[in-house]
Image (cartoon, helix red, strand yellow):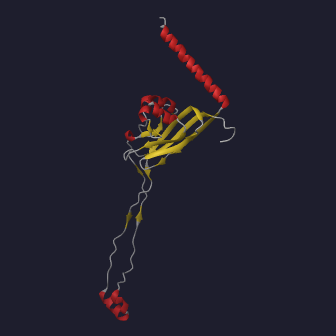
Amino acid sequence: MPIPINEALERVVQRQNVEKQKRKQVQLQRRNTVTDTRADFKTMIRGDNNLYTGFEITKDMQFIMRYTFSVHVSPFVTTVDQDIYTEPTELFIDVEKRKKLIDKDDDLKHSIRPNPHRHKVTQGIKITEHEFENSGLRVKINDIDITDAIIEEYGSFIDGYGYFPANEEAFDVLRIVEHLANWEKAVVLGPGRKIMSITQSAESLCMCEISYYVKYNHIDRGGLI
């Protein structure tokens, strides 16, 4: 069945735009430099109610070529839980003996000398694994919540312990941002310091390691930063 003329023209325009973008990127790559920043399963810093890490995209960035991350989630464990016990200690006073001592030492009238005794302390080290509820976990980049966008693109986010995404190499931020508003997309893909954080609740405490990779094109600095 023949393609309508309007649809055919629209396809031609789209192909031309794609080719223009490719030629522009090739020209920029010839004049500019490619830089990347990465971390391989870096332990995220624990805040009051979140885990976070940060990296930098230089302000002379032209466009991002690759932007991915993955996480490894493991139980939050308390390694030291101490209990201290002391044995009951009793003090006995020998009245007759004390009276004889007072006769020899007048200072004893105003003091009590306890009998020799000791305390016994038992200290135990206990490892406790906290329960995990993953429904409270949210991931943000510079305070832009991308959790729903991840779920829309990949079908799920974190649903237990292990490596995520489970069936793919990494979450692709360039795909995820297509589900965000334009202003949110500008924040996530813009230059500057990026803070990636995973918020937690009291029921969703966990340990998290993150791998990220950002590759972008920027102006050739001629060997100078």
The percent position of residue 175, horizontal first and vertical second, equals: 49, 29
Instruction: From this view, report whether residue 187 is shown above or below residue 19.
Output: below
Q: Residue furthest bottom?
A: 103
Image quarter for residue 224?
top right
In this view, the residue in front, 171 or 9, is 9
Residue at 44 percent across and 42 percent down: it is 198
Q: Note whether residue 10 is visible.
A: yes
Instruction: Locate residue 41 relative to residue 154 in the image: left or right.
Output: right
In this view, the residue in front, 224 or 46, is 224
Q: Residue furthest top?
A: 1
In this view, the residue in front, 82 or 154, is 154
The percent position of residue 9, horizontal first and vertical second, equals: 52, 11
Instruction: Locate residue 102 relative to residue 4 in the image: left or right.
Output: left
Residue at 36 percent across and 93 percent down: it is 106
Instruction: From this view, report whether residue 3 is shown above or below residue 154.
Output: above
The percent position of residue 68, horizontal first and vertical second, equals: 53, 34
Q: Residue furthest right?
A: 222
Residue at 50 percent across and 37 percent down: it is 70
